[in-house]
């Protein structure tokens, strides 16, 4: 394609008005200025067009050239993604550092995938096989955890006339030839280029009836997320959004994790980049980075690249979804992304809406979250894949009524509300169980009953009812003091304390408590609710709460959270038996002393 050249007219930060390219298209990538900075067309007029530049524009001058590339902003998909660390437009940060040092130079053009590295290709079709878009023609053992599947790209369909033998190939080498119905031969390589602004195709959406287990008890129990679902975690500064999302990304029951640090502080992203390579996958024991793609676009990077980063991330996620994997995508945070929209919109002179955000804020958020879901892929083998989207929201001052939070809540189906008061009391995760919610409870109930126990839904309802009653009682206690409460209500306060301290609090820094398998979570909840029921029954018979609090089994209950993952069944059984013995002994002792209002059954 012959590249056309225009010229710069005006410059306003990342927004550059240009002229001289009458055939330019929306979202076309252009090279701006003498340094050939990367830009994308975001507005087309009669004589001029507007470009948002993904690099620092200081030093640009009117009259410098603008070169059309004819391509849309696209990502390179194929072997080499896993374990990679990119900037907001899929330039590998390690390569950028090698080329320019600790400070990224402008105008650098680095491929998203290494075109020279050889990958072992294992064919899975034979000559003569009929293939359609999305069909798997081979596999590449990319990491110790994941095997990448090589798929037929969109637009290619027909009969395999040549397939490479098992050997090592670069991502741009032909590994398959397909003859279509017209007799034309199409070369298939391991790499695909996909525009980021439009979602990759699929056949149809599938029901979301399997939970995405996170290992975080408060989420898995009270606000469960479905595989393919959408969720948001809003909270003010210091409430633990980033740490919670890090926990989600580390331990979620997903085969691939895509984490995009969109406008976050550099020190938080540095912590992730330094810590994650040393983390072990809980299932395989391999490094967690072997199934992770990190996109780092911090707050000091150009604002336009921040706007593009979540589209790059979700397109990479769709590529793994199309292979049949369950993908978890974490966006931290969509508020910073919305601020980039606001800045660019203001420089374009568009009419602002509430708090200066553009009027299309809600629709842009919806377009992003709608690219999640559980789907049947285009392949002929009825393959299922999912993308679970979770976005952090950073409302100024923790005000959930601000536009980004409200627009997000109208879209997502899981809401984890971080509470400033809980965080101030060092209660982490600081998720308020009474203001948070999940709309997936009913669709996931069957899975929970089949895989955990028939009593799971009732245990969750009882625990939530106790927490709700606890909040009501605490308002009374603040007025009249705890001594004015009857023993039955004191028991409720104690039960709520156990649920909050022995179950909901979870240390991200403890080697065992950082992750709680769903089976262990179920047993912990069953033990605590069993104690609560026995305490309520004993109080009804006339036992004082202070006598119950002297039982030694309470120490065992408090230590359940640090029970090793591989031995919790035996230890929980022992706790339940001890609890039964101690309650029976206490009741018998009080009955023999004539201190019970009702006989021991």
Image (cartoon, rainbow, N blue to C red):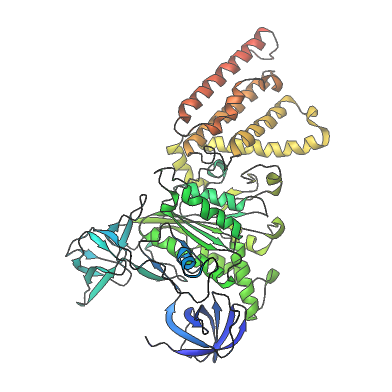
For the C terminus, which image quadrant?
Answer: top right
Q: Quadrant of residue 336?
A: bottom right
Which residue appears at 22% of the width and 70% of the height? 177
For the N terminus, which image quadrant?
Answer: bottom left
Q: Quadrant of residue 137?
A: bottom left
Residue 235 as seen in the image, left or right of residue 77: right
Q: Is residue 100 visible?
A: yes
Residue 486 higher or lower than 232, as above or below: above
Residue 60 higher or lower than 564, as above or below: below
Relative image position of residue 29 (x, y in whole percent): 47, 79
In this view of the protein, which residue sits in the foreground, 31 or 516?
31
Residue 487 as seen in the image, left or right of residue 83: right
Residue 421 as seen in the image, left or right of residue 12: right
Relative image position of residue 94 (x, y in whole percent): 46, 63
Relative image position of residue 328 (x, y in whole percent): 47, 54
Q: Is residue 358 visible?
A: no
Residue 511 higher or lower than 305, as above or below: above
Q: Quadrant of residue 410?
A: bottom right
Label tally: 0
Relative image position of residue 436 (x, y in whole percent): 62, 48
Q: Residue furthest right?
A: 480
């Amino acid at each position: 394609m012959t590249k056309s050249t225009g010229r710069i007219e005006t410059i306003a930060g990342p927004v550059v008005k240009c002229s001289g390219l009458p055939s330019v298209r929306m979202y076309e990538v252009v090279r701006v200025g003498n340094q050939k900075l990367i830009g994308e067309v975001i507005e087309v007029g009669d004589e001029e067009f507007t470009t948002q530049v993904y690099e620092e524009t200081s030093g640009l001058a009117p009259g410098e050239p603008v070169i059309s590339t004819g391509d849309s902003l696209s990502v390179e998909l194929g072997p080499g993604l896993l374990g990679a660390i990119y900037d907001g437009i899929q330039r590998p940060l390690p390569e950028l550092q090698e080329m320019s040092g600790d400070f990224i130079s402008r105008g650098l053009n680095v491929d998203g995938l290494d075109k020279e590295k050889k990958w072992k290709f294992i064919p899975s079709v034979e000559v003569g096989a009929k293939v359609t878009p999305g069909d798997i023609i081979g596999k590449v053992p990319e990491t110790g955890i994941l095997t990448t599947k090589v798929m037929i790209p969109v637009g290619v369909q027909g009969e395999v006339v040549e397939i490479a033998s098992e050997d090592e190939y670069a991502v741009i080498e032909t590994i398959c030839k397909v003859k279509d119905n017209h007799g034309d031969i199409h070369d298939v390589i391991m790499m695909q280029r996909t525009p980021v602004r439009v979602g990759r195709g699929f056949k149809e959406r599938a029901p979301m009836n399997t939970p995405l287990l996170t290992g975080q008890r408060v989420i898995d129990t009270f606000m469960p997320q479905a595989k393919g679902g959408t969720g948001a975690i809003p909270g003010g500064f210091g409430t633990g959004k980033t740490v919670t999302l890090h926990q989600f990304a580390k331990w979620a029951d997903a085969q691939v994790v895509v984490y995009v640090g969109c406008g976050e502080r550099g020190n938080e992203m540095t912590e992730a980049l330094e810590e994650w390579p040393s983390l072990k996958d809980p299932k395989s024991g391999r490094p967690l980075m072997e199934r992770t793609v990190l996109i780092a676009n911090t707050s000091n990077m150009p604002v336009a690249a921040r706007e593009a980063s979540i589209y790059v991330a979700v397109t990479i996620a769709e590529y793994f979804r199309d292979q049949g994997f369950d993908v978890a995508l974490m966006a931290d945070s969509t508020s910073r992304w919305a601020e980039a929209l606001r800045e660019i919109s203001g420089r374009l002179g568009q009419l602002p809406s509430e708090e200066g955000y553009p009027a299309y804020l809600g629709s842009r958020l919806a377009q992003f979250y709608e690219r999640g879901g559980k789907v049947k892929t285009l392949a002929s083998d009825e393959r299922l894949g999912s993308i679970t989207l979770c976005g952090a929201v950073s409302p100024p001052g923790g005000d959930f009524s601000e536009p980004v939070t409200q627009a997000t809540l109208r879209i997502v189906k899981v809401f984890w509300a971080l509470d400033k008061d809980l965080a101030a009391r060092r209660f982490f995760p600081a998720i308020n169980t009474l203001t948070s919610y999940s709309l997936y409870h009913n669709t996931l109930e069957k899975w929970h009953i089949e895989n955990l126990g028939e009593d799971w839904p009732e245990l969750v309802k009882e625990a939530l009812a106790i927490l709700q009653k606890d909040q009501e009682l605490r308002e009374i206690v603040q007025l009249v003091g705890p001594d004015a409460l009857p023993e039955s209500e004191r028991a409720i306060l104690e039960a709520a304390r156990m649920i909050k301290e022995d179950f909901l609090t979870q240390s991200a820094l403890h080697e065992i408590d950082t992750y709680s398998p769903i089976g262990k979570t179920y047993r912990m909840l069953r033990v605590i609710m069993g104690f609560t029921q026995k305490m309520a029954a004993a109080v009804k018979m006339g036992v004082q709460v202070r006598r119950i609090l002297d039982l030694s089994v309470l120490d065992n209950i408090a230590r359940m959270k640090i029970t090793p993952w591989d031995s919790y069944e035996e230890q929980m059984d022992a706790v339940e038996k001890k609890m039964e013995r101690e309650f029976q002994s206490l009741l018998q002792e009080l009955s023999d002393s004539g201190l019970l209002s009702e006989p021991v059954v």
